[in-house]
Image (tube, helix red, strand yellow):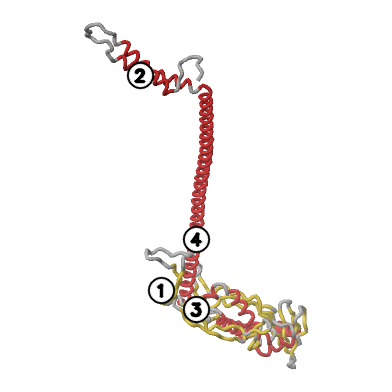
Amino acid sequence: MTPKRIALLVTSLIVMGVVTILGFKVVCNVDDTEIVVLQELDGDMEVWSTAGWRYQGFGKVTRYPKSQEYTFQHQEDDQGTVTSTKECLPIRFNDKGKAVISGNLSWDMPTDPEQVLALHSKYRNSEGIENRLVKPAVNRAIYHSGPLMSSKESAGQRRGELIRFIQDQAIQGVYKTVSREVEEIDHLAPPVEVVEKVREAKLDDKGDPMLDDKGDPIMIEVPKKVKKPATKKITVYEPEMKDGQPLVEEESNATKFGVLLHNITIKSIIYEPKVQEQINAQRDMEMSVQTKIAEASKAKQDAVTAEEKGKAEAAKAKWEQEVKKAQALTAAEQKQEVAKKDLEAAKLEREAAIERAKGESEAKRLVMQADGALQQKLAAWVEVQKAYAAQMGKQRWVPTIQMGEGSSGGGAAAGFMQLMQAQAARQLNLDMQMGRKR
């Protein structure tokens, strides 16, 4: 290589380098994922938002991604322990609880050239837009969403509302709010003792509940000391509404410049230790309350079951008594019917006996009337004769010692007997002679 050739080679390399550099300044390739702003040599601005090669003309090119993600997430180790919250955004709730929010969102560049040029003129690059426009808009939305709920609400049933408030205020602007004071339970403070009127069953002298006509306990109000959770007053902010939509007090800068914020995601809310302790206490209390409610519900159900069981047993006992009563009434009615039948039978028997006696008496009367009661008179006369004979047989009618001659005593006895027979016959009105007419 001679010095001349070396100089020629160096000159060629320089020329090629200059041509290459100038070539990049002459034309520009626009990708379909970006928006390019060209500042020409004379200072005019041009926006390219469609893909393809463009003539640059040695002007200055600034590239903006059409869509980009902004993250404000915490850092954690392999065990899931939070190690840093530097990138998270702060929030303060209406109960003065503090926390930081970890999440992310997407933001899109506008496609309107005037809006793109306005952004380029103010923020110069995508990093400037993210740090000076997107992040403040989200931070401001989070800051003004906190007072719309309590720490506990943000950790529970209103978490979805919090995300909606943040996204809406980041896009539309800060809400116009109204405030009011409310009283809520302070779970970190010890319970306080208060006197309240409670309803209790009225008791009698024996200590048993007094019942009304329906069998229900008579309830009265009596003062009683009870322990209640401590309370505190907080200021609650609510969006001022018009036609069902919240009023905006200050428009969002993102909206002014046409930057679209979307897909806002809250991955976690990291509360300060005191607030987390309060939330845990609230959760424990709610679980305890739910347990008590379940126990009370079970006790109430058991009471209802016992009451219904008692009613059923009472009804069963009552109907058993009714059955016994019915059985007793049936037995008594049966006895009464039997007694009536016996009485009727006795009456009939008595009437029959009377009728039989009347018949027999009438028959006897007629017989006696027909023969002059001959049969009865003869029977009586025979009995009388038997009695005389028995008595006469006991007498000594013949003397043991007889002296001299005389008539025997047998004749006198016989005469006496005849005399007595005649007297008996007269008394019986009995005629012993056959065929004699009276």
Question: Element type at marker 2?
Answer: helix
Q: CA distance from mark 4 to mark 3?
A: 28 Å
Quick check: marks 4 and 2 in contact, CB under 8 Å? no
Which residue type does callout 2 highlight?
Ala
Task: Please indicate whether residue 428 sits to the left or right of residue 404 in the image.
Answer: right
Q: Which residue is mark 2?
A: 387
Amino acid residing under circle 1: Lys
> Which mark is on residue 184?
3
Considering only vertical position in the picture, is 134 above or below 354? below
Q: Which mark is residue 351?
A: none
Q: Position of residue 324 (x, y in %)?
A: 49, 46
The secondary element bearing badge 4 is classed as: helix
Q: Earlier in the sequence, mark 4 or mark 3?
A: 3
Where residue 202 sits, quadrant-wise, is: bottom left
Disc nearer the start of the sequence (1/2)? 1
- First of labels 4, 1 by sequence position: 1
Cα distance in 3D space between marks 4 and 1: 25 Å
Give the residue pinned by disc 1.
224
**Of labels 4 and 3, the one closer to you:** 4
**First in residue order: circle 4 vs circle 2:** 4
Which quarter of the figure has residue 52? Answer: bottom right
Q: What residue is pinned by disc 4?
A: 298
- Camera-nearest residue between 224 and 381: 381
Which quadrant holds the N terminus? bottom right
Q: Label 3 near label 1: C-beta < 8 Å?
A: no
